[in-house]
Amino acid sequence: MTIITVPTKPVAGQRPGTSGLRKKVEVFRQPGYIENFVQSVFDSLEGFAGKTLVVGGDGRYYNAEAIQVILRLAAANGFGRVLVGRDGILSTPAMSCVIRKQRAFGGLILSASHNPGGPEGDFGIKYNISNGGPAPEKITEAIYRRTQEITAYKTVASPDIDLSRLGPASVAGVEVEVIDPVADYAELMQNLFDFRRIRAMFRSGAFRMRFDAMHAVNGPYAKTILEDMLEAPTGTAMNAVPLPDFGNGHPDPNPVYAKELVDIVFGPDAPDFGAASDGDGDRNMIVGRRFIVTPSDSLAVLAANAHLVPGYAQGIAGVARSMPTSRAADRVAEALGVACYETPTGWKFFGNLMDAGKVTLCGEESYGTGSDHVREKDGLWAVLFWLNLLAVRGESVETIVRSHWRRFGRNYYSRHDYDGLESAAADDLMEHLRGSLAALPGQRFGELTVESADDFAYTDPIDGSVSTRQGVRIGFAGDSRIVFRLSGTGTEGATLRVYLERFEADPARHDIEAQTALAGLISAADEIAGIKARTGREAPDVVT
Ligand code: VG1
Ligand code: CO
């Protein structure tokens, strides 16, 4: 093999955020941009000579081109074998599954996840380590440092391979295998859930569901698993062909962007169950007939019912949730007598806890749920978990959630996003908040009295690494809370996220519309942070 060493210069701004490096497609298309970043990833790793790398993405615009570039870099840098999903497709959870099952050294995921795609949209790259999970901060920071000092990248002169043909291929003599992106993942799902029982539920004809793949990566997974293996009627999976621009949609499964599905479950002749997943298939939204389940509640319900599902029948070791996620799961963990961990936002913080056997289930308020079956959040897994529960309990989604609230109380919850803010204004707002923390305890805002105020810092209980400035949290008497943080996945200006949570024990008060139940917190958030004054915005752009 003739390795070509191409001189290059550092490109500014290649710092991975909450989940990988995300930029506009036009940024990624600059000559050498991908090469610089991927070479920096390889330069930050050790001991991969002759080992296996997995490559795949969510099928968005530029996916295939990026993969061909990466295959040449992987060959030149000494990987022994590369597995790549057919047509360049691998969902994020399937990537995690394949890395683990095939004992690969690591993987590169081409995705900007829930961000829009297409020539004017976003692109992204994320590196996953050998446990199948996202690289921890220690590695992502090393990659970033490397991008600032890189002088050359290594590649080979070798033609593009045919990504549509399953089986062996070669890049400059290095073995490349085009794999079925669904097979390993589907087998894992079959081992966790009671497929016979779910199949019987579909066969009965008395249960109907719709799964919205949002024209993103989970389409083929849903078709195979729901329609072929579980015999749900054809058409159960909608928008099931991955498109480079996600059909011009925003592949973020929440009631705002998955409106098509929400309209179906609130419409005439609504199915019993609905679900959607995001660009790269790791997020999930769960809805019942005329009933929306918040992701925080979903995590709590899964934890409380895990013993009903074969893969978790032995019980769960513990639960972890990201800091802004509601504390509904904490109450379940307490009842089960297992630990509940609070981590910074981003799935990379769950990996150590799962590897150490401390937690089985993890979740985030941002429509992410998963378990130690892989090291990523997993959209279709959550859907199958719910299907398994519905089949065992024979009750509606609404009945299951309402009885959960009666037993554990209800954590009213909402997230308000202010998108595309001027970065300086958003930074000012956060700095001002941080500066006011010491004076907040004891202050009253309407009916609410501040009990605690801090900037969340996390010490990983396994490796002792410390992550600071992970979000401002303000606790109020009576178990209410507001969290403020800036997004680390956006590509335009800054996004302010305001997370609102209020606990209500009394079942007689479990029927209030969420924004009404949270009204006191919503105005307190504005008073404390000066959102309107500092951003010039009258209202959030997205309320979930
Ligand atoms: C958001 C969510 C976070 C999630 C991350 C990646 O990050 O809040 O919970 O882990 O997206 O999800 P941020 O920094 O924008 O708040 V995915 O499905 O886009 O990889
Ligand atoms: Co995602």
Image (cartoon, helix red, strand yellow):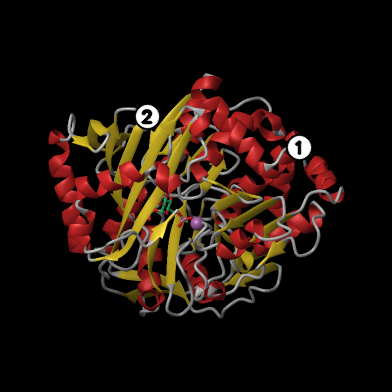
Q: Which residue is mark 1?
A: 394
Vertical order, 316 against 414 (above or below)? above
Res. 515 in view: yes
Mark 1 touches mark 2? (CB < 8 Å): no
Nearer to the camera, 300 or 182: 300
Nearer to the camera, 357 or 493: 493
Q: Position of residue 492 (x, y in %)?
A: 32, 68
* Residue kind at label 1, given as amino acid type: Gly
* Residue farthest to the front, as pictured: 508
* Residue farthest to the right, as pictured: 204
Q: Nearer the viewer, mark 1 or mark 2?
A: 1
Q: Which residue is mark 2?
A: 461
- Residues under labels 1 and 2: Cα distance? 40 Å
* Residue kind at label 2, given as amino acid type: Pro
Rendering quarter of residue 270: bottom right
Vertical order, 457 against 67 (above or below)? above
From the viewer's perspective, tell me whether residue 425 is left or right of residue 49: left
> Dot 2 lies on which element?
loop
Q: Position of residue 97 (x, y in %)?
A: 61, 49
Q: Position of residue 518 (x, y in %)?
A: 38, 43
Q: Is mark 2 within 8 Å of ligand 1?
A: no
Disc 1 crowd rating (10 Å Cα; few below 14, some 14-19, many 20+) is few
Q: Residue at x 48, y 77 (%)?
A: 118
Res. 180 in view: no
From the viewer's perspective, tell me whether residue 355 is left or right of residue 538: right
Q: Earlier in the sequence, mark 1 or mark 2?
A: 1
Disc 2 crowd rating (10 Å Cα; few below 14, some 14-19, many 20+) is few
Nearer to the camera, 226 or 483: 483
Q: Position of residue 178 (x, y in %)?
A: 66, 66
